[in-house]
């Protein structure tokens, strides 16, 4: 198959969307498919084997700290190249500029179009306006915009049940099949066995951490929606009872400065370490320093960092959220806390209780296998194939009734196959 992926964000930007695209591209190419990435200018082609087309773009001033860009909605030159390629399917990963270009290409060349809805935009309107009353109107606008974008898609993919419910009930996307396909990750680089004790201790030393000190790890984008400030508030009490603990924050983002100031105000700056941004290929190494992985965010649509931590055999402590409870089972493969005040007990229990830690590591490792890149590839490959069949069938069928019957048949078959693929890998 010739697959076109249309995205506003791509390498070198670090985000869950970019990770998802990288994983999908890697797995599909391994299976012999041709993958073409259409994105904004200033993107980076990680290796020679990738086929990248960049639309002219400018920096996005809203939330500019994320270094996102917005492209022109059409490129005649790239459209001509797409015609020559002969794409079999258009897969958009954004609702904005390059996503709109993908929709135009779909209509222009009669190519089936599917969409992955990654981000519930109403959780991020505070970057546009801090005024509460205006935020309500912006949230409504975000829902209307989301519904309008997916209206012509053959189907919609979401990474979690939370996102699927949001589209269905809040955005009122009712007459469109929504399939839940969590992003897969390449588990192999995260395995603890990849790193010797000597390597871990050397990295600890470079961060000013002693060999016998315990590490409470956060890894991800350092931004307000990650609620790192809640974790920071729990630290003084933890450090008072356990002065040999360190809070390691790996990553960068707009909240780094305010969190550094918070650590100073709490008088715990000697126990809190900020690494700043680390190269992607170094991320597994940092995971493997952790004695416990923590995250208090309730805005995650999937939470790939939790899966990565599980793959690295690091026990997880998270704030309860419905979508996280889909794969984090309390006291089996992680700990879910209901109240912020519960973080201290959960973190200390995981570090100090050897039996609990072993249980969580074992359960987490099994969960990580369910979210492997191979499962992700199986599901998307099947979905593409079925949607292409549907698109061809609709051209050949004469009546609207026949087309509707065919749609229902194929949509049902996709749902059944997704369930089967999930069960096979569990």
Image (cartoon, helix red, strand yellow):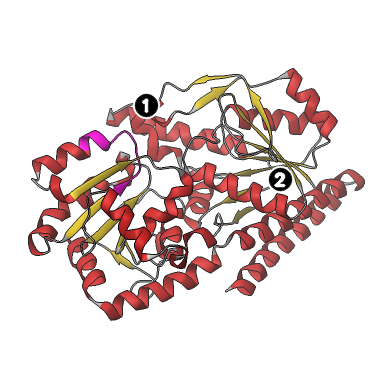
C-alpha span from label 2 to label 1: 31 Å
Asked whether residue 391 is in view, the answer is yes
- Residue 326 falls left or right of residue 49: left
**Residue nearer the viewer, 117 or 256:** 256
Left or right: 79 as drawn, with respect to 25? right
Secondary-structure class at tag 1: loop
**Horizontal and vertical percent position of residue 361:** 39, 72
Residue at (45% x, 50% y) in the render: 301
Q: Which residue is mark 1?
A: 128
Does 311 appear above or below 74?
below
* Residue at image location 45% in from the left, 38% down from the top: 121
Q: Position of residue 153 (x, y in %)?
A: 68, 41
Q: Which residues are magenta?
A: 249-258
**Disc ID at residue 154:** 2
Left or right of 395 in this view: 308: left
Q: Secondary structure at mark 2?
A: loop
- The verdict on residue 126 being magenta is no
């Amino acid at each position: 198959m010739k697959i076109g992926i249309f995205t506003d964000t791509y390498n070198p930007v670090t985000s869950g969307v970019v990770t998802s695209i990288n994983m999908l591209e890697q797995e599909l190419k391994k299976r012999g498919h041709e993958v073409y990435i259409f994105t904004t200018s200033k993107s980076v082609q990680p290796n020679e084997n990738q086929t990248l087309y960049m639309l002219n773009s400018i920096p996005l001033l809203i939330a500019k700290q994320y270094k996102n860009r917005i492209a022109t909605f059409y490129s005649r030159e790239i459209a001509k190249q797409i015609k020559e390629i002969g794409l079999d399917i258009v897969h958009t990963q954004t609702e904005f500029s390059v996503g709109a270009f993908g929709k135009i290409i779909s209509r222009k060349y009669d190519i089936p179009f599917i969409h992955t809805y990654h981000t519930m935009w109403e959780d991020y309107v505070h970057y546009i306006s801090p005024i509460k009353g205006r935020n309500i109107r912006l949230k409504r606008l975000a829902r209307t915009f989301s519904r309008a974008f997916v209206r012509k898609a053959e189907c919609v993919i979401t990474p979690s049940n939370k996102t699927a419910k949001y589209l269905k009930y809040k955005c009122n996307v009712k007459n469109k099949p929504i399939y839940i396909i969590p992003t897969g990750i390449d588990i192999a680089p995260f395995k603890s066995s990849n790193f010797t004790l000597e390597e871990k201790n050397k990295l600890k030393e470079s961060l000013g951490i002693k060999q016998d000190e315990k590490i409470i790890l956060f890894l991800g984008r350092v931004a307000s929606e990650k609620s790192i400030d809640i974790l920071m508030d729990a630290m003084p009490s933890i450090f008072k009872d356990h002065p040999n603990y360190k809070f390691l924050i790996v990553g960068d983002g707009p909240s780094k400065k305010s969190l550094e100031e918070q650590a100073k105000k709490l008088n715990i700056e000697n126990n809190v370490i900020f690494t700043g941004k680390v190269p992607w290929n170094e991320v597994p190494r940092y995971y493997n320093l952790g004695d416990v992985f923590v995250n208090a965010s309730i805005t995650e649509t999937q939470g790939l960092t939790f899966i990565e931590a599980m793959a690295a055999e690091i026990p997880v402590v998270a704030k309860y959220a419905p979508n996280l409870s889909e794969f984090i089972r309390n006291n089996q493969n992680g700990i879910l806390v209901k109240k912020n005040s519960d973080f201290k007990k959960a973190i200390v229990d995981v570090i100090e209780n050897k039996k609990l830690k072993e249980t969580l590591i074992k359960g987490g490792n099994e969960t990580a296998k369910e979210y492997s890149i191979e499962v992700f590839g199986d599901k998307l490959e099947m979905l593409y194939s079925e949607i292409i069949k549907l698109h061809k069938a609709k051209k050949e069928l004469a009546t609207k009734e026949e087309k509707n019957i065919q749609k229902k048949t194929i949509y049902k078959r996709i749902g059944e196959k997704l369930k089967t693929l999930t069960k096979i890998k569990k």
